[in-house]
Each structure stands twice: as structure tokens, then as C-alpha cells.
Amino acid sequence: MRRAEGVALDRRTCLVHLGWLLPWSLGARAANLTEADAAIGIRAALERGALSAVALLGKSDGFLANPKVRIPLPGYLEDAGKLLRKLGQGKRVDELVTSMNRAAEQAVPEAKSLLVQAAKGISVDDALRIVRGGDTSVTDYFAVKTRTPLGERFLPIVTRATERLALAEKYNEVADRASRFGLVKPEDANLQQHVTAKALDGLYLMIGEEERKIRRDPVATGSAILRKVFGR
């Protein structure tokens, strides 16, 4: 009996601390917020943030024209790129960078169904864990649930988009040899894997930004449940 009371108290405490998750004044409003409302609100916020991020990135220039998520050459190739530019090969370098970012833009729409599924799959316990978590708890939830399967979906798309470039193939050959001597990080030894990882990083970053917009101004979402859970 005491254990059950303790669990119930812990849940109520987490609901009261929804003020940590979003900048709102609690008081009587928090007391009227049920666990179900909290879970529904967080699901709605995550789904909205995920769909917005996919829409922003999964289009032409979604990555390439956005400095926050634009995918650069891996460190090793970045240095080589500077030398190639001095040798008059800047066009080839630019072509590779553009191809990398176009590949990410093509891959991101594949994330939509998995992200929505992960958002809808949040239980009351998941919601409470997010409340207890730190500043990256929402992004961490998505990353744990979706990063591996999304990587498996992204990689073939990225590979098809970059493999036709001779410079990409040459990079992989050189980087593979260099990685054996510790000159290149394992994650940077393959251009396609580098692009896939950066595409996922960019996706989660934008989901986080969309979530912060909802936190700052839930009224602007036009959603009754988001206003109820996240409103001031």
C-alpha cells in the first residue's frame, strides 16, 4: 500500500514539475492537469515538432541553405578540400558538398512515419520520464527510439546520391587507409556514413527547435491540448 502511494505521489510530483519542461506558472492549473493530459500533450508536441522538422529539412536547400544543419566535408576531407581549391578543383569540392546535402534532403522524408510512430507510442511513464529528464530529454527520447532504424533507412538513399561522384569514391579509399593508422575517426572513414550521421543530427536538432517554439508560445499552435498542457 505504501509503495502504491509512493508511486502515485511521485507521478503527481512530476506533473507539478511540468513547469521545468515548459516556462509556465503552475499553481492551481497544474493541480487540474491529469496524467492523461500530460501524456497527450507531450505526444502532440513531439508529433508536431517531428513533422515540422521533416517538412523544413526534407526539401531542396533544407540542409544546404541552413547553416545550422548544413553538412560539411568530414574533417580529413575538409583539409584536402582546401588544397584541391588551391589546385583549381574547387568546383569538384562544391559538387561533393552539394551532393552530400541533397542526399540528406532526400533521406529525411523517410523519417516521417517512424517519428510519428515514436511520438504516438509515448506512454504515461515515457512522458513522466521526459519531465524528469534534462534539457535534451525530448531529443534523447527520439534518438533512442529512432536513430538506429532511421540510419538503416537513410544510408541506402545517401549512398545512391553520392556514389556516382568520383571524389566521394576516392575519399573513401584514402580515408579507409588513414583510419587504420588512427589518422581519421572511424565514423569519418566512410563519406556515406558521415552524411547519414549528420543528417540525423540535423533532424534531431530541428525537432528540438520546433519543440522550443511550442514551449514558448503554445497558443500559436492552435491546439487546445497544447494550450492546456503548455499554456501559462
Image (cartoon, helix red, strand yellow):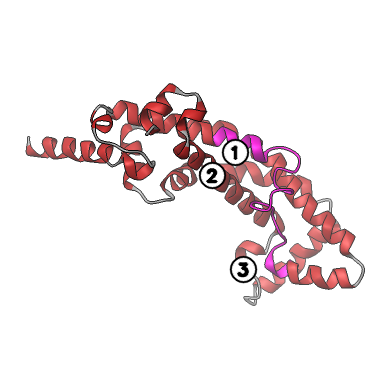
Foreground: disc 1 or disc 3: 1
Q: Is residue 36 visible?
A: yes
Q: Is residue 129 visible?
A: no
User: Going 51% across and 39% down the picture, which residue do you hit?
Assistant: 213
Amino acid type at image mark 2:
Glu
State whether residue 188 is above or below residue 138: below
Towards the viewer: 122 or 193? 122
The numbered disc on residue 185 is: 3
Crowding around mark 1 (Cα neighbors within 10 Å: few <14, some 14 to 19, many 20+) is many
Which numbered disc, 1 or 3, marks the residue that appears first in the sequence?
A: 1
Left or right of 118 in this view: 158: right
Check contact, mark 2 vs mark 1: CB within 8 A.
yes
Q: Residue 38, how many percent across, how many down?
A: 34, 31
Among the 4 quarters of the image, the one containing residue 17: top left
Q: Residue 210, how many percent across, how many down?
A: 54, 40
Residue located beneath label 2 in the image: 209
Residue located beneath label 1 in the image: 53
Foreground: disc 2 or disc 1: 2
What range of the chain is rendered magenta?
50-77
Q: Residue 163, how many percent across, how many down?
A: 79, 51
Mark 1 vs mark 3, CA separation in Å: 29 Å
Amino acid type at image mark 3:
Lys
Mark 2 vs mark 3, CA separation in Å: 29 Å
Which numbered disc, 2 or 3, marks the residue that appears first in the sequence?
A: 3
Image quarter (top left, top right, bottom left or bottom right) of the N terminus: top left
Left or right of 207 in this view: 79: right
Towards the viewer: 224 or 117? 224
